[in-house]
Structure formats: structure tokens, C-alpha cells
Amino acid sequence: MKRFALLGFLLLALVGCFCFKRPTLETSLFALVGEEQINLSPEILQRGNCEIQVLFFAKTLEEALPVAEAFEARLPKSAFKTIRFKLDGALTQTLLDAYQANPSGLLAPKDAQLLESGAYDRIRKQAVRKWHTALLPLFPLESDPFYLLNGFITSRTLALSGWHAELNGVLTKPTEEGIALLLSLSLWDTIASNPDALVPIVQGLQQSATELKTEQVEISLSGVPLHTVEVAGKCKAEITWLSFFSVLVILLVAWKAFHSFRVYPYLLFILTFSGGVGALCTMLCCSKIHLLACVFATTLLGLTIDYAFHGLLAKDPQAVRKNLLFSWMTTELSLLPLLFSGIPILVQSSIFMMTGLAATLCMVYRTLSVATTPPGETTVVQVPRCIRILKCLLPVLFLVLLPCLAMLQFGTNLQAIHAPSQQLLDAEKRFRDLTFPDQQKEATGLLIVEGETLEALLQREAALDLPPETARISHFLPPLAVRQKAYQSLQDLYRTQGEALMQSLGLLALLSPLPPKPWTEENVPALYLDNFILRTANGRYLTLLPNQPPPATLGEGCFYTRPQQAMQQTIDRLSCITQRLLAIIGGCLLVLLIVIFKKRAWKIALPPLLAVCVVFLCFGTGGRTINLFHLLACFMLIGMSLDYTIFFASGERHALKPVTCSFLTSLAGFGALALVSFMVVRSIGQVFAIGLAVSYCSAYLLFYGEAAPTPQHPKTEKAATLLGMNVLLYGYRLFGKGFLDGMGVLLAWTLWLASPGIRQFTGSRQRLMAFIQSMIDKVVVMSCGRGQPTIEVATDADTQAFITAVTSRQGVFLLSSHFGAMEVLPALPSSAEVPLHAFMHIEQTAIFNRFYFKLFKRPSVQIRPVAGFGMGELFEAGTYLDQGDCVLMAGDRAFGSSQTVTFLGQQVAFPKGVYRFAKLLEHPIYFVVCYRIGKNRYRLEAREIIPNDTMVEQFIAALEPFVKAHPEQWYHWEIQP
Amino acid sequence: MKSLLFILFLLPTVLIAKAVPERFVAALQRALDADATWVMTKTLPDLKQPILSTGQVSCWKEKGMVWKTVTPFEEEIRVTKASITLIVDDEIETKPCDEMPYYTDICEATDAFLQGETDAFEDLFDWTWQEDATSGTWTMTLDVNRRQLRRLFKTISLTGGETLESVTFISGDKKMGTTLLRFTETKDTRHALWRFEDEPK
């Protein structure tokens, strides 16, 4: 109950923390190392994470358009924030209305030059000419008498990044083979950041592309979400299978170790508890958690299982406590550098693992008993010669491998993190070549302009010295400062040329120009806000200028970055830091081991060091390089390897089994990650697969003979709970005896499977089932409930004589045994009038007996609990017999004085006192059995016992044939049939 | 200039599956390879009286069009598939076609129309046709159904007989006014405004 309460409290804390903190799950590869490392804000990364570009390649637009329209019709519209396929007139209308509301200072370059130079006369003449052409204006005369706003609009290029707007609104670009048509999609943030929601949508797009493509029309999809799905889709399936496989291995290893299912709830509890504590602490400390941190964090589960196995299989709890503490300290120490590494994914993983492991240790400590076992005899094991040789070779091997480390190659290129498929790479290249055909992609980067307000942003962007053909937002929204400057000239224009214009055109009136208003989110069309402007969490405005060469100077609020190069540099730097940390932590652990284990420290340190050496040589030589994730996995490998050696070296004689169980479960769980397609996880899995195998094998060889196999000891069982008994009782009252019989079958199977102790005691499932059935029948008989068994009385002379003696109130002394169920005897109708006094020793089944007496309804049966047989019991029994009642005592339960007799071929202890009793009381003595012969049917047989010195032998002679004929109904557990 | 392009090249427009009247097609195809004088009356609500202009136009089927304004000022616009050139007071300003949205599409559609593809501009307009048997004149009314173009004009009304006689552009917004162009074909000249070096090789 305490455990449930603890879990419940933990669950509440988790839910509360989740609701309060609302941590977000990161999936971006940039978030792996921290966006600030590569100078990209989360908003920029989020924008990139949401964009998908679909290209339709064909010879002509007429071929491409129907396919594109069919593709667009299939899109799940609710998943996309924007779908840019056909630019329609509504957008154009919105744009023109926005400009018309704020027209002052919006000038075509040529008009701006004329205005600045004071050529007002030319502007007027130009306006007159334009009003005289056949064309209809975009803006009414009263808003734009000098045709300046009309000129501004026509001077703006409508092409977006070089894409040409067709008359039907689609964006196209010519290619060598014909034409490319663009459909741009922007996912909602919540969908782009949730792999479970993203994967089906992207897979749907890919399926549509596959189904709609023809010989004439090719469809290509690119964008960050496709990379995410390519990784997540494969990863999810693989990790699901691997998790299933790992759980299966854990279950099988646990069964093999414990031969019982009872350990599963404990393992589940401890995993849930440690995982819950780890998750709670991580959520409290981190507002964003990377998906890969969850993968790393699964190493906690392996360590938890390891500790649990050690705790459950402990023969010497004190020794195991000490070893667990050492193991925990070394593991925590090996994880500590990750906590301060500054790399988000490592910080998150280390918080999870360190806190979870501490919780595991506490919980395992609680389950270890405080009693200590006395030190046993030292096991002397003959070590085979080959093992001795290998023991000596291991240090030599390490010394030989050590210099080879000088040849190691370290390096992490971005393909170590993510290697997209060739199809996706080709699609990305095609889009890039179409959109930025003339630029050197490798030499360009991303120019970011930031402003506290929209106007500040526009001002800074306009001030940048960029090629005129660069598409930028200030091209469409000239900053206020520029427009205010133009406005002053505009006022002069209106003042000097207004009259002449009015006369030329015959204007009714000429309105003065309005002062320009600053651009705000309210008066800027959504088209620009969605496509060109980002808003950060702290309220700043950003705009991005991709594929730019490095600028000569950067003004205030401007940043230049090459994300991929920055990420590569960051990873290289982190690799260097990690190498140093690994060396430092190796040194610290070595010192710690020397302090604790003194001369044996080298032996304990050797297997982990050897494992790390072998791992490094496998991945760092022969043209391969050790990447950052190999290094990170080494931290965890060291911790887990030390767990093996500490336990092997502890002198704990039975460490082989728990360490082997730990190794197998860890290998199945983490070594199997080497099969995953995602590079990062695969690197970690490779390290574990090789490293764990090397450390286990080398630890086993080094400490061979010091850890003997664990002997099997049966475990004692706990009695049934009162709650469970009451449940059965109420079920019986509601549904009848059939319910109890069914529950009995279920109980028999459960106990048989769950308890090796019961299997050993009972010897067969049939015996266990018969025992349970007898208990059920006892309860039914004594409670006078439904389904009373029927009792046949044997027709032999002794049995008939017994019945006559009882019914004629001669006062019969009944000797019972642990064969069958004497307690059902009161169900015999003829026994109802004859009281039966049962003198019983009932200490050993206390819970059952409490329940039994609570139900007891037979007035003719009196239970007399006794701890022994003395004069008091003698007189009491004599009184009952003299009254004509029956007295019942067990003839095969030895307590008090006993005698050794031969029974069923074994020397066993039988009581003495009960036979003396029977002899002294001078009443008929009968050995009575009541045994089951069918469903709810019993048979009563009796054998007369002659009161003399051979009463025990008579008893045994009467009992043995029944036991041999029905061994499954023999319930004396200390004497096997 | 861009809007002028829209007007001139959207003249030969037809729609959808129903057959465009042959008289209309013939008149437009004739106009696109002929010379004419024109008178333009532009009515805007903010003016005391309409704006009046006169001039000449010379269309060459394989080449393009030259639009010349004579009064109240002189101005010449030369429209070809490659560019649009504005000549004012000896100043020449040329804009390449790729700076003009929809320009190439309209040029290609016009060529197709002139080659006999009467559905070259299908789904741009809804049209209605009226013929006056007495006078022998026809009226073709085109309602723009492309939203991108509606800002420029909502309806184009063309009238004529054997030749195109008038084009009226009516904006959807009253503030933008209407423009009426009347054409008189110059029978004794052909491609008169085109210079020798303009002739197709």
C-alpha cells in the first residue's frame, strides 16, 4: 500500500509539473547542441521546421497544373497554416488597400530620384502623360494625383525569390526540361514539433506524390519536416521493436533468475518510480526536452534493472548495500561532467539518469532486509588453466592496446548525426538550384536582421548594402525615415506643381499629401508578415535573407551565420571538450577506486578501461573516426562496466547471477540500439554492444572463481490475506460454490506459476489443487452454506461399527490425519446430533483460521485450540467422551513429545501424547478418514484402533494405504508421499 | 505601360467551350495586324471633364505593336515580345519582358489566338455577344473573372463590324473611372509606325 501511495504521489507530482511547466519536446537537430551555439533563435528554426516545398516538373504548364491541382486538393487543410499555391486577387487587393491607406513616400526608384533632385516639373508632366494613357489606374485620382503610388506598385517585382507568377496565380520557373511549378506549405508549429502528428501528414504527402506523378510530370518534396519524418518514422518503428525485444529479454531473464512472476510487479514498480523521479526532476529543471534525451535516458532503465536484480538476488544484504553504493557513486561521478557540459541534450539526460538512479538506489535499499548473514565458508573453485592464462593476458592486452590509442581519429561530421536519403538530398538540391541558381551555396549564409519594432527592422534592413535584386521586405515596405524624407519633398511638389496639375487634368480639387505612418502589424498585409517577418518570444521582429555572401560590415541588429558550418564547429568544439572530460573523469574514478579498493583498484578499473580502449580502436582507426556520440556513450559505458567489476570484486559469492542478468538485459536493451538506422542512436548502441561485452567478459575472467553460482533456496510463502478471503466469501454467497471452485482453479495456477516454494512443497499441481479444494469444502461445510458435499459411508465392518458407536453415543475417540479433509465430516447428516470436540494445534495458519472461525456455524462441532496436551485437556476430553460426544485429535502432527516411526519409507516424527490420551480415556478409538472421491463427493472410512502399545503402528498401517492410493490428498508438507 | 499591355493584348479574348462568333474573331485578328487612328476619352469622377487624347496604333502580327500618342503630347510605346519601350521627348526607356508580370503569358496567348486557337484566353472572361442585324454591328462584353485583373477593370466592352471600332474599359470601382477608345482603321497604310529595322527577318 505504501508503494502504491508513493507511486500515486509521484504521478500527481508529474502531472502537476507537466501542467505547470508545460515542457516542450524538441526534435530539431539544431536543438541537439543548442540553438544559441549556432546563433539561430528558436523562431527561425521553428519557421524552417514548418516549411515544405513541393515542386512539379513538366515540359509545359498545361501538363504540370492539373497534377498540382490534384495534389493541392488532397492536402489535409487543417494541418497547414498556409498553403501557397495560387496567388489570387484577394491578396493583391489587400496589398493595394494597405498601400492606399498609407501612400506617402512610396516611390518608384526613378520617381524618388526625380523628387530628390527637385525635378518636380518632370514628375508633373509624367503624371499627366500617365493619366492620358488608356490604362485604368490602380488607385483613384484623389489618392494619387501625381501617379506616384501607381508607379511604386508597378516598380515592385512580383516575383518571389525569382519565381514567376503566372496569370492563374501559380509560381513557376523555367528549367532545362521545361517548367517547374511551386507549391509551398507551412505546417502549424504544434504539428511540426510533434512527430506523432507529423509523420502521417508527411507520409500522406509522399503517397500523394507517388500516386499522382506521371511520365510527364515529376513531383519532388523537400523541407525540414521530411528530414524529421525520415528519421522519426524509421526510428519510431525500430525503437518500438527494440523496446519490445528488450522487455521480452528482461522478462525472460527475470523468469530464469527467479522462476516466478512475482518479481515482475516489483520490477515494474521500481522502473516506474525511478523513471518518474527522473522525469519529474528533468521537467523541473528544463523547459525544453529533446527527443534524443529520452533515448539516452533509457540507459537509466537498464541501470535500474541491474540494481533491482542485485537487490533481489542478494544473499548478503550488507555486502550488496555497500557494493550498490560504490556502483552508484561511480556512475553518478561518470555522469556528472555531462551535467555541466552546457550541451542541452546531455544536461537533460544526465539530470534524468542521476536523479532516477538515486531514486532506484533508495528503493532497492528499502527492499533489502537489514539482517545480515554470517560469513560463509569460502568457496574454493578450481580455475581451469586457460582461464588462468587469459587472466594474465588481459592486463598485457590493455598495455598493448594503450599505445594504439595514439592512432585514433576523432571527428564528427554532420552525416554522423543525420544522413538523409539520396532522394531527399536530390529534392533539396533541385529546390535550391531553382531558387538560388547563381550563388555559391557553400560560401553563403543567412543574414538576420532584428528590430525592436517593425520600423526599426525595416530601417536596418534598408541600410544594408545588398545587391538590388535581393528580395527583401524593405523593398515592399520602405522604412518610415525614408518616407518622411520623401514626404517633405512631396509637400514641395504639391505646393509647386499642384495648381498646374489641376489645370492640366481639370481636377476638381487637389488634396494635400498625408504624412506617412509607421508600419505596424495592424497595417502591414498578412502576406508580408507570414512570408518575410518573424516575431520572437520577447516581442522583437526578425527578417531573414538567405543565401547571402558574407557582408563587408554588419550594422546594429544584423547577424550573419552559416548554420551548417556553425553546427559543425560547435560539434567539433564539443567533441574536444568531451574528450577532455572523459580523460578527467577517468582519472577521478581511478583515484576513487584506489581510495576504496586500494591494491585491487587496478583489477576493478581494468575491464572498463579495456572496454573503452576496444571501443575506441574499433571506431577510431582504419579510416573511421570516433564521433561525439561515441564519446558520450563512453561515459555511460564506464558507469555500467564498473557496476560489473565492483560486484564481481566484492567477494560477494553469489554475484555471478545478478551481474549476468544485468549484462544480458543491458546488452539486449542498449546493444540492440546498434541496429537502429538513426546515426546518433546507432553510434551509442555500437559502443554499448562492444563495450559491455568486453567489460563483462574481462570482469568475469579476472574475477573467475571468486563468485560462486548462487544455490537455489526455496522461498517461504506468505499466507493469504484476509481481504482476499472475504472477497471469496462474498463471491460464494452471491454466486454459489461454483464461484469458489472457479477461483480455486485460478488460485492453483497462479500459485503454481508464481511460487517456486509452493511448487517445491506440494510437488505437483494436482496436490495443490486438491488442497485448495479441501480448504474450500471446509469453509462451505462449516459455514452451512450452499453446495454442501455429499459423504458416502464405506460399508466395511469397521466403518459401520464406527457409525454405530457414534450414533449410540458411546463416546468415540477419533484419530484424524493430514489425509483428506476431516472437517467435512459434520456434513454427514447422522453426525448432526452428536457433538464433536476437535482438539487442534492451529498456530501455523493464523489468517485462515481467523476467517474460518468467523464463518463457523456448526453448533455440534467445537474447535478446541490447544498448544499442547496436558492433564487439563485429558480431563476435558474424558468428560466429553463420558457424555457420549466424540473427541477428535490428529494422530500425525508431532508437537510436544514425539517418536520416530517409519512412514511411507521415511523416518518421521509422530506424536506420543495423543496415543497416550486415547489409551487412557478408555473409549472406542477409531482412525477416521474423509477423502474426496469426486466433485463435491467424499467417502468416510474408519479403522478400529486397539488401545495397546502398537497404536502408532496401527495408525500408520491404516493410513498408509490411503496415502499411497491418493497421494494428492496428503497434506502433511513435511512428509512427502 | 504594364496596364496598357494588359488592355491591348487582352482584346482578342474568348472563353470556354462555346464557340466564339467568327465575326468577332475575324475583326480582332484583322485589328492585330492593321494600322488605325484612335481617340481616347477617359472619364474620372474627380475631373471636371474627361481626359481626351488622340493618336495612332500600328499592329504587326509577328512583331508586336506601336502605340503613338499625338495629342495632347507626343509619346510612343513599342511593344514586342522581348520588351516594352517608351519614347518621350527623345528619351527612351526600355523594360524587359521578365519584369512585367503575366507579360510572357499574354504574348504567347495572343500568338496562339492569332494562329487560330480561339480558346487561347479561355477562362479569363465571361462573355456575352450581341449583334445588331440592322446596322450590322456587334457588341462583345467581357466580364473579368480573374481577381488579379479586376483591380484594373471589371468589364471590357468591344464593338465593331468588319473591324474593331471601339473598346471601353469599365473599372469595378467608380473612383477609377472608365476609358473609351475609338478606332478608325487606316486602310492605305500597313505597319506605318514600324521602322525598317523593326521588320521581321
Image (cartoon, coloured by chain):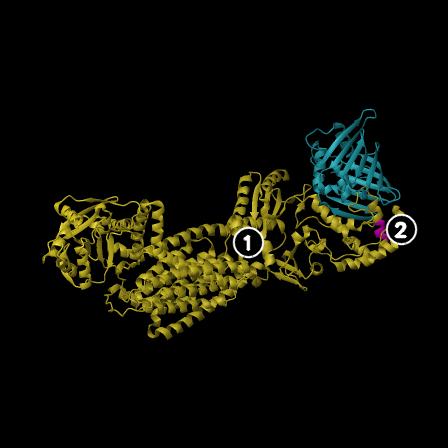
Is A180 in front, or is A831?
A: A831
Quadrant the N terminus of chain A occupies: bottom left
Return the x and y of residue A957 as percentages of the image width and height: 12, 52
User: Dividing the picture into quarters, in which one does residue A335 lie?
Assistant: bottom left
> Is residue B54 positioned above or below A916 on the image?
above
Q: Chain of mark 1?
A: A
Chain whose colour in the figure is cyan: B
- Residue A838 colored in magenta in the image: no
Residue A914 is drawn in which quadrant?
bottom left
Q: Is residue A660 left or right of residue A680?
A: left
Q: Nearer the viewer, residue A776 or A575?
A: A776
Residue stretch rendered in magenta on the structure: A121-126
Q: Colour of chain A?
A: yellow
Q: Nearer the viewer, mark 1 or mark 2?
A: 1
Residue A244 seen in render: yes
Using the rendered image, report if marks 1 and 2 lie on a common chain: yes
